[in-house]
Amino acid sequence: MLKKLQRRPIISIIIIVLIMLCFNIDLLSVSIMEARNFITAREIINDGNWLLTTMNGEARYQKPPLPTWLTAISVLIFGAKSLFALRLPAIIFVGLIGVFTFLLSNKLLYNKQHSFINALIVISSFYVIGIIIEAPWDIFTHGFMIIALYYLFQFFQLEKPSYRFAIIAGIFIGFSILSKGPISFYALLLPFLIAYGFSFHYHKFKSKLVPFSISIILALIIGGWWYLYVRLNDPTTFTAIAERETSNWSNYNVKPFYYYWSFFTQSGLWTIPAFISLLYPYLKSRVRHLKAYRFSLLWTLITLVLLSIIPEKKSRYLMPILIPLAINIGFYIDYLVRHFKTLKDKRELIPVYFNFGLIALIALAIPILIYVFFNLDIKEYWFRFSVTTIACMAFGIGILINLKKKQILNVFFLTVLFFASLFITVIPFSKLVISPNYKPISDLKVQNSHQNLRVYGLNYVSPEMIWQFGDKIPPLKQKDGVIELPKEPSFGMLAKSIKPKDEAFLKKHYHIKQHATFDLNTVSPESNRYNGRLMNRYYILTKK
């Protein structure tokens, strides 16, 4: 089976991503960033706001619309009630990042096995998967950019200028800009260009200047037309949002320069190999393609420096660095595949045994952890628990046996497959620990339609709550802080809490009665993971 994976690497990458993410992805809770994307997609479909996009009826220009368009198209095809349909475009882009990491690596290395290793590392890196839930725009902008870099690399490598490669690269750079502005241009393309210049040099670039310029102009046109359209059609709102977003880069969530220095831990399974792959003095004499290794290392480190310069820092902003880092890790794994059987130095052996031995032990421990952590009733869940136990035991024992035999390539493949299997076997158990306080709001819209009640929000109602409700929840309080009373004699109101001043004002005009509490937290209020913004009380107000 492991040999079959290598024979058809692109098909194998796609199959692994589909198996990993298509079966239980709908069991994961919708994040705040996802909810914003999904609400905008819903309003695109319901209201036709394809260009002047909205969220909860208000202008939503903070993010360009291409990822939301793709989400909306998926919903039109598969239906609005399918969480899988909403996440499918992002899943496809995980696969595309894997495929084009393989293709780019193969142009760099001319070695399919090594390139396949690189691709498997990137699709099994922790934050590459996590970003599709936490910040879905990122997977699109970086996915489009890695496609562009594949063609741009070929453009630079050819002796003669290729207008075809330049135009294709320009189109996908444009799509990247239309997905999240210049983020990937700065975090992936710019360090790529600098690293390429240092590693390979831009030979005969004068003859390529015209097609390269066309590529950049095309990218700016494709990526910038929407910004121009919104600027012309809603200039006041666009300018206000642009100023607020720009100020965030220097004033919001500011972290020190060294905040990202533990970036290699974001690769998850590959944390130890990632760290070792960055040790240039150690690895430079052990790799087969020194120039290519220098390129991937420089690409990784320059990305780190450029991201560190920006005052605003968040863990998810590190996602683009995982693409060159995966290529960099691949050099270390390739070295182990070729030489591990003959290694004698304990300093080289111990990290390998520790890393993969630890993964094997985790695999063997998972059934016990599930039983203890989820307080599992074996009789009720015996089939699911049995499948999980068999799979984890098989992977854990398989990794240990091959590690003992020093079959590192098999160890590597089993590690990737074990990671993929967790999404099928372990994620379903997460639904067993939902707090009794959890109360979704999904049925309220239907209930209110029978009573002809419209729902409004007071102060803050979270995007997750608005998404699950299934429709807009107009705010009662306007931007100037004044409460605008609805025309309806009775209406519903969601509020986390009501300030005394607001309560006194509303009681002058309405009888207020609390009817329910909606709580989207899956943990109990005593947990330190409990998020207060996911709870709202529901009131019905009737005019006096």
Image (cartoon, rainbow, N blue to C red):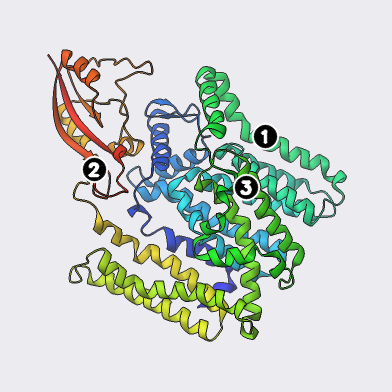
Report the Cα–Cα distance between label 2 and label 1: 43 Å
Residue 220 is labelled as 1
Which residue is more in the foreground, 46 or 500? 500
Question: What is the number of callouts on the image?
Answer: 3
Q: Position of residue 69 (x, y in %)?
A: 48, 38
Name which residue type carries label 1.
Leu
Q: Position of residue 259 (x, y in %)?
A: 55, 48
Q: What residue lies at 70% left-to-right and 36% top-to-bottom?
A: 218
Give the mark, 2 or 3, whose residue is nearer the N terminus: 3
Q: Are marks 2 and 1 in contact (CB under 8 Å)?
A: no
In the image, residue 229 sits, relative to residue 319, either above or below, namely above
Q: Is residue 484 left or right of residue 424?
A: left
For label 1, the SS is: helix
For label 3, the SS is: helix
Report the Cα–Cα distance between label 3 and label 1: 14 Å
Q: Are marks 2 and 3 in contact (CB under 8 Å)?
A: no
Give the mark, 3 or 1, whose residue is nearer the N terminus: 3
Residue 145 is labelled as 3
Q: Is residue 13 left or right of residue 520?
A: right
Name which residue type carries label 2.
Pro
For label 2, the SS is: loop
Can residue 172 be seen in the rendering of this structure?
no
Residue 440 is labelled as 2
Q: What residue lies at 49% left-to-right and 69% top-to-bottom?
A: 416
Pointer 3 local density, CA inside 10 Å: few below 14, some 14–19, many at least 20: many
Give the mark, 2 or 1, whose residue is nearer the N terminus: 1
Name which residue type carries label 3.
Met
Question: Is the C terminus in the top left, top right, bottom left or bottom right quadrant?
Answer: top left
